[in-house]
Image (cartoon, helix red, strand yellow):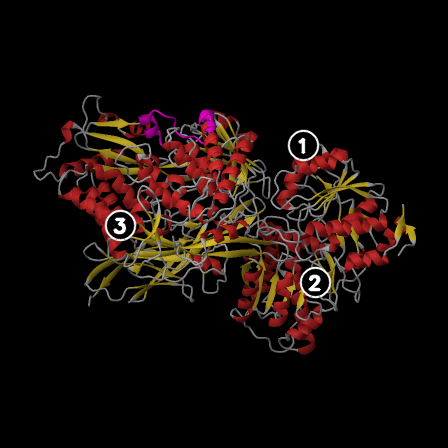
Amino acid sequence: MTDKVDRRDFLRSLGVGFGAAVGAGASSFPIIGTAQAQGKPKGSIPSTPYKIGHMTFFTGPAAVLGEGMYKGQVLAVEEINAAGGFLGKRKIEVIKADEAAGTDANVKELRRMKLQEKVDFFCGITSSGNTPALGPVAEELKVLTIFVDGCTDFLFDKAVPNPKYVFRITNIQSADGAACALAVAQAWPTVRRVAHIHPDYSYGRNVFDHVGIVFKKLLPKTQVVSEGWPKLGTTDFTSHITKAIGAKPDLLVTSVWGGDYLALYKQALQHGLFDKMKVATTLALAVAPHALGKDHPEGVIGGVHANYHFTYPPKDRWPLNKTFIEKYHARWKEYPNFQGEGGYTATYMLKTAIEKANKLTGGWPSDEAIISQLEGMMYAGPAGYTYIRPDNHQGYKDAITGFTKNVKEYPFPILDPERVITIPIRNITAPPGWPKGEPTSTYTWIDKTWPVAKA
Amino acid sequence: MNLGVRTPARAWAAALVGGVLGVAAATARAGHESPFYPSFYPQEIRIETLDPAAARAGWGKARVHAYLGADPFSGVTPPAEAASVQHLHSFVVLTFDGASSQPRSADGGGTDWCANAGRVIGALARDTGDFVVHPYPVTPYHSDYLQHFDLAQQARARVGGGAADGAGAALRIRSRGEFAQSLIPARWKAPASAWDATLEEIELDRLVGAERAAAGGWSTAPWARQGWYQAHRLLAGHLPDGARRAAGETASRRLLSGDYGGPTQRINLERSLVSTLRAGCERMVVGYRLRGERYNSEYSIGAENVAFDSQSGFDSAVFARTVKLKDFIWNGWLRLGIAARPAAAWNPLGGMNDGFGRMLWHAVGDPALLPAPHGGRDIANRVSVGRSPSAGAVAIPPDALMPQPSSGELRPVGAGRNAQRHIRYFAVLSSFHHGARGGVADIVYPYIFAFRWAVDPTGSAAHDPSVARSTALVRQWLAGFKVVRVEEQARNYGADLKFSYQVPVVDVYLNHRLGDPWQRSRADLSPRALNPDLRSAEPGEEASIAPPWSTLPWEVVVLMEEAVRRGVAAFSEAEARRRRVPWLDLVRDRETGRRLAALVESFGREAYRPAALSELVTADEARERWAALARFHAQHGHFLVTNGPYRLKSWSANTAVLEVFRDLSYPVGLGTFDDLAFPLKAYISRIENRGARLELRAEVDRVSRFARSYDVLRVALGAASREADERDRLECRYVIVGPDGRVVRAGVEALNKAGRFVVDLGKLAAPGRYQVITALVLGGNSVNPEVRVFEHRAAGG
């Protein structure tokens, strides 16, 4: 598409929200499914435990992500069990497994969980390396599954193109780069010279691609003036920082994450990088709310994996988030990351689907009945609404990002509550029926359908 | 030479050099998370000699994250963020060595000494702060405490029942050291000229330090941390000549060579040995002393996830492999203060044996197995151990190899040879700091070295008594080895996050075997095995004696050997003094460095490799190795090359700065040993007597982490527990002591499906009263256990 449109008009048409208001997703829909108590179940409900197999990272560097997911699910399970369990009868047992065992071992563990432990439901998964391996196995084993993360587009683009048993509720990976780029286009439309520092593996390349394609459409005058691809395990980012500074960019985009991002920003501070350019990140605030120090500069686009930050939706406007944060903090003495919210929401989505299916069928519903209720579900959780698309079983919720800010209530930077950016996920995701594309369907959809904005 | 496999040795080497490692081509399948990061948390570790006052002054400014040595806050109120870990530091012993304290009993049995010892202990004996009265040499900080528990209690009761007030005529006691001096009541203090006994503090480091960390990290004695062995080291030298000394030496020899019928016999032999050592009271253990070491726990400048060793504190390999800065998810700059100045030469074969050197080596070196910090069996680090199929003697394959004394040449053991133990090792190779990939030659060279440096009657430069001592264990135990194959193992995290490793599989045959009473009979899956598909047993006690492993590349060992042979330097301090040459230092001695560099250049030209390696290393490979070493020296200015997690970056008179070696070929990643930072305990909550069996219920500690802190909660463990890993890590150890005071049965039980431990009390032959001594062990933590004793009366038959 070559027709040029006004950038601000196009951003408006995408529904990009900017400010303190609750995003479109959270304000446009009635609350349909929440953690409310269900009515009296219909029919006879067995009292046998309902077994959930939960797999996430409990060891290694990704444990900082994964443990939150487990904690979120355990919190939900404890609440549900305190009320008697699913349909007031079936107490939930959680069997956990460490995702750090590796993809091959994880596939075996899923089989073991289903065939030996007889799990009723499989949940969790942080790594996008694992969902494409586990998804087909879950389908083969006919085990009802909600992946909390493992957000690669590849899962439903190619690995499980016609899912029946497998669902996923986090936004897909392409949303990271797209959301970051849209935030730049919204907040800093005058940038022209762009430097990139990304980890030298697929995630970094995914972000680079999707930032690039959005910039091509919305900021067509930008040019990439520097690329840095630190290898996995890099501790000294000096060469990448000096290279970026040397290219005199207006903007640095980085998807370096976790401990690497801490090392990067602390070294960047020493080089005065933040004074020389604007900085946009995809994951700076996503790993754990307490990860960054107060020395982190304010005003950086602090990505939250396009998913959730515990300060948004604001407590005073979205009670579901307020309650969740209070309960999570009381239980675990920390604030949830997006995985924590995901584990909690996945459990309550399952509960909601079970209750709705029970009302239709009576007794304990079959997996097929539960699946029919998950498909098309619009669920109101702490992060806002999540909509499960029936065609690909992917959950969609408004992508968010924003700007880092230090406030006195927290000993770490948060998303600036006055400048949260929300984007309806449907507007940055390939629609149903769009042909599978490379590197992602979303990439080709943006490339082929978005207009180029006037400068 | 046939190395025992069909694949030619050179083909292995080629395969290793060409091994697949690291990140493959990118696709869109992987996520933002890399589930594996090689090496450990800090990206830099600075070790600096500081006196306690300087450490205290820099505490609030994060100049020191942890301090190795005496408490810098001794005598002052420590700040809230000065957290402490405690470990067994020393024994306090009383030795009747004065001229007037000869035994008075006719048979020399020392009755009077024992009575006097009781009086002295009664007079001294008050638990004060870090000093614990414990008149028995096996303490709660030893993994064999359970099998000595009743004897230790009896010893304590005897003291408690004696002249606890120190009544009676005062003995004249002299002291060695300030602490001992502080314990002695004024009226018992001896004049300088005459005394009855000497009270002194003997530090564990002085007692068994050398055995806890043998040369090169190649081989360690499994008994060095056990109470019976330390008791022998502490007391045996004071036994009078005669039957008791002979009995003690016989028992010790049998224990060191596994010359007993099984675990129960071993326990009785250990008990008998300690009783023999104590019987005459020539030297008595009065108690033990704990040392607290400090780390800064403040958020955000402090540290967390701190593992330490129950017998050496931060002076342990697990410390650098767990400690994490609070301000970082990973990475960051860690600063360690240490009281000791770097005195020993920096060579890992005969130096680095002082506090500073050990701390440096813990991070730079990488042993096959790590000593379990809180008791139990060693922990797999760079090798996994397969199940040993043999229950008794096993035939050694004729084509297994043995190094020849002096030359180290590898020759087949030949037909008709048997071993007592067969262990299959899976050794995970990686790149060395100079970039060369590890190979079979590297991991078998320690065997060659051990035999090349065996006792040399000529007294030439090719001998160092210190090295001969530190390698003696390998020579005594090794009966042959065979490289079975080289496997490729992978960590697969999907798509472009795949890591492949070369893993030689090596069968090692030993002349002796040990009967570990706490070895679980079922096949355990080592939680740290590189590949969970590899069914791996927990390493047995013998696994650390002669593992096929080296953290040093063969050419660095050869360089040191040749430097010593040519008179450039000596491995050990004693030999350096005797031969009046420098103590070999791979880092700090410029003149030695210059001469070593010249040797490297010469060896590179010659493509030199020892004759013993000629079948394992080609001339081209040798040339490449020497070139890599030369390049490393040119770039880094030293020769301390290893395949460990940290690399020496810079140094000065009182500092060493290490940088993380986050090489993708390094197979152990951050988080691997995190559970060691929480030495959790288990407790017996209920014992039920079912007649022919005891049933025990458990409570366990669980750690709940949040933000940058954690809680440890004690919870009941029931049948419904789904914490499968916790159930696997939990065990009940028991010892049944018969009416005659001998152990009749000992064993270890796993939790059953009903969530209970069952101890079988059937088939106790002799009628009478039995003591069932039990303790629960979680995750191998047997330190300071909660011991429960149950009285059982058997009808016999």
* Residue annotated with mark 1: A270
Tell me the chain of label 3: B
Position in image of residue B81 (x %, y %): 52, 35
Q: How far apart are the two marked residues, 3 and 2, measured between alpha carbons?
A: 68 Å
Tell me the chain of label 1: A
Q: How far apart are the two marked residues, 3 and 1, measured between alpha carbons?
A: 59 Å
* Residue annotated with mark 3: B257
Position in image of residue A38 (x %, y %): 67, 68
Position in image of residue B754 (x %, y %): 42, 66
Between A455 and B505, the residue placed more toward the observer is B505
* Residue annotated with mark 2: A34
Q: Nearer the viewer, mark 3 or mark 2?
A: 3
- Membership of B585 in magenta stretch: yes
Tell me the chain of label 2: A
Q: Which residue does the image show at 36% across and 62% down from the upper left?
A: B389
Q: Are marks 3 and 2 on the same chain?
A: no
Q: Nearer the viewer, mark 2 or mark 1?
A: 1
| Type of the residue with mark 1 | Gln
Q: Which mark is residue B377?
A: none
Q: Residues within 10 Å of mark 1 (few under 14, many from 20)?
A: few
Between A76 and A69, the residue placed more toward the observer is A69
Between B358 and B629, the residue placed more toward the observer is B629
| In this rendering, position of residue A431 left or right of residue B79 | right
| Type of the residue with mark 3 | Ser
